[in-house]
Amino acid sequence: MDAIRQQFTEINKRVFNLRDGEVLKMQKEYGANYKKSMGVVIISLQNIANDYTVSHELARLLWEFNGREQTLLAAMLEEPEKVKIEELESHLLKTHTPELWEQIARVLLRKLPQIANHISRWLASGEEVLQTYAVLTLGYCTEVFSATVLEQILTLAVQKESYLDKCINRVLLKIGVKSEDAFNLLKNNALFQEKYPDLQEEIASFY
């Protein structure tokens, strides 16, 4: 554990040395008001992560620090097969910006074992953050899309023009265009036709 703690300290020093006031200013202008942020760009964080072996124990220290950069690095360095889903969900619920939601889904959640079960549970959780993660992860794991998943999405209480609403539109568009079977599933679902008529028309234009 001493070696892990040493790596954690080293990573934090590297993050501090890469702090960027201009990026931090831009984050604030776009409403991403992190409690802890150094404004380090994603590519620099990925370069840091590349210098370390993935480690659940190291990721746990980074998650617990709860800074923007540390959270992104935790997702990059986490071991998908070792992290307990309840523990991971507690970390996910602390995130509050689209940047974190998008990046964590991309670098970590798509790799989790039994991801279909997690997507379904997150959609049913009643937590908008977890529902957003479910939809974003579905965009990378389109093979788990089904009539059941569609029904779960369509029955969510989604505020129009919210980030979750935009994610649903984007992901269903990707799924509908990618697979003719998925397109037919959407086309034959009356609730989808009622809630997303413009999206249905856009998907149909690809066929």
Image: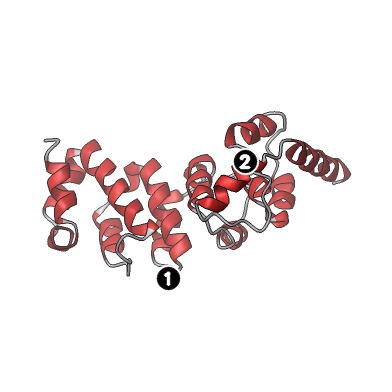
Between 93 and 189, the one lying in front of the other is 93
Residue 91 found in image quarter? bottom right
Label 1, secondary structure: give it.
loop
| Residue 79 visible in the displayed image | no
In this image, 149 relative to 18: left or right?
Answer: left
* Residue at the farthest right position: 2
Mark 2, other Cα within 10 Å: few <14 / some 14–19 / many ≥20:
few
Q: Where is residue 76 in the image (x, y as percent from the top left)?
A: 61, 40
Vertical comparison of 164 with 181: above or below: below
The image shows residue 81 at horizontal and vertical percentages of 59, 45
Q: Which colour scheme is used?
A: secondary structure
What distance separates the C-alpha of mark 2 from that of mark 1?
A: 37 Å
Which kind of residue does numbered mark 1 sit on? Gly
- Where is residue 192 drawn, in percent x and y? 18, 59
Residue at image mark 1: 126
Amino acid tagged 2 = Glu
Instruction: Name the residue rendered at 30%, 63% in the picture.
Output: 152
Label 2, on which residue? 22
* Residue shown at the point (56%, 48%) measured from the top left: 27
Whether label 2 touches label 1, CB < 8 Å: no
Residue 144, above or below 120: above
Q: Is residue 116 visible?
A: yes
Classify the position of the C terminus by image quarter: top left
What residue lies at 59% left-to-right and 62% top-to-bottom?
94
Q: How crowded is mark 1: few (under 14 residues within 10 Å), some or many (20 or more)?
A: few
In the rendered structure, which disc, 2 or 1, sits on the residue that comes first in sequence? 2
